Image (cartoon, rainbow, N blue to C red):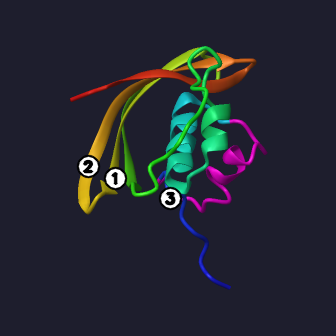
Amino acid sequence: MGEAKVCPCRRGEPFEQCCGPVLAGERPAATAEALMRSRYTAFAVGDTEYLRRSWHSSTRPADLELDPGQRWLFLEIVRTERGGPFDDTGVVEFIAHYRADGARGSLHEVSRFRREDGAWVYLDGVIEP
């Protein structure tokens, strides 16, 4: 039997035990950071349906298209504020590294998360230089 595929969020766990069940709707993200990791994974695997489901209803885009030429390489969590099991809001600062058009790049964002109907959702973010 082959080795399980490591989850794109790079926590070191197999996809089927890490973000896979969250993307499939089998279990919710327990923290704002876990939601951020699952959303990064959704970008990496092209799961626009999950991205829309995990977006706050007040800021969710009507349509979402991903760049098929962009390949997400790895995620760095810089810091978190709140966003735990007993919080209603949280902040996650991250750097997502990618390759597009043959060049490497990164997206540095400070994202805000909020609970909506008891589940963590992405509210908005500020892109850092």
Quadrant location, the C terminus: top left
Quadrant location, the N terminus: bottom right
Decide if residue 99 is on the left or right side of residue 103: right
Q: Residue at x 75, y 18 (%)?
A: 117
Span of residues in magenta:
10-28
**Direction right: furthest residue:** 26
Up the image or down, 22 lies above or below 16; here it is above
Residue labelled with disc 2: 105
Q: Residue at x 25, y 55 (%)?
A: 104
Decide if residue 28 is on the left or right side of residue 81: right
Q: Residue 43: where, in percent of width, then height? A: 51, 47
Work out how far the residue at label 2 is from the one at label 1, CA to CA, in angstroms: 5 Å
Asked which secondary structure carries label 1, the reply is: strand
Q: Residue 17: where, in percent of width, then height? A: 67, 56
Decide if residue 42 is on the left or right side of residue 117: left
Up the image or down, 70 lies above or below 51; here it is below
Residue labelled with disc 1: 98
Residue labelled with disc 3: 12
Amino acid type at image mark 2: Gly
The mark that comes first in sequence, 2 or 1, is 1
